Image: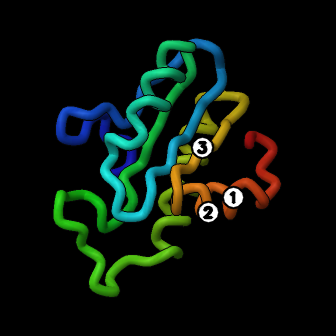
Amino acid sequence: MLFAEKFSNQELYVKGKNNKAVLIVHGFTAPLSDTDIFFDYFKLKKYTVARPILAGHETREIYFNGFFGPEDWLKELEDWILKVGEKVEEIFIIGVSFGANLSLCEAVKNNPKI
């Protein structure tokens, strides 16, 4: 689902104009709408804004049952960071609840763009 522009009428990615990006990571079992306020704010400030939908969260019925876990979610974030990083000089990561834990895992990897 990497770089889909919309998910159920919600924007997932928008290209900004200031050469900076904000990657927003939703919480565990949280609806994507929990991140709308961040997405809309940084979009208005002309940032590139991206918010991946973590594996198992693609539908209203959360689909885990042992199929998805932290490795999958961290890999998905790494893919978004690489892809967004091709288009901007700096990336800021915001995580909501469990998304903050995943964000910290990525932030400590010393990626010069973060």
Q: Whole-percent x and y of residue 83? A: 54, 43
Label located before the other in sequence (3 or 2): 3
* Amino acid type, callout 1: Leu
- Asked whether the beta carbons under mark 2 and mark 1 sit within 8 Å of each other, the answer is yes
Left or right? Give the position of 9 relative to 35. left
Q: CA distance from mark 2 to mark 1?
A: 5 Å
Q: CA distance from mark 3 to mark 2?
A: 10 Å
Left or right? Give the position of 51 relative to 109. left
- Asked whether the beta carbons under mark 3 and mark 2 sit within 8 Å of each other, the answer is no
Q: Whole-percent x and y of residue 106? A: 67, 58
Quadrant in the picture for residue 46: top right
- The quadrant of the rendering that contains the C terminus is top right
**Which residue does the image show at 49% across and 31% down from the upper left?**
38
Residue to which mark 3 is pinned: 94
Question: On screen, 36 above or below 55?
Answer: above
Q: Residues within 10 Å of mark 2 (few under 14, many from 20)?
A: some
Residue to which mark 2 is pinned: 101
Question: On screen, 97 above or below 52?
Answer: below
Q: Residues within 10 Å of mark 1 (few under 14, many from 20)?
A: few
Q: Secondary structure at mark 3?
A: strand
Residue to which mark 1 is pinned: 104
Residue 110 vs residue 83, the one in the foreground: 110
Q: Secondary structure at mark 1?
A: helix
**Which residue does the image show at 62% across and 55% down from the upper left?**
103
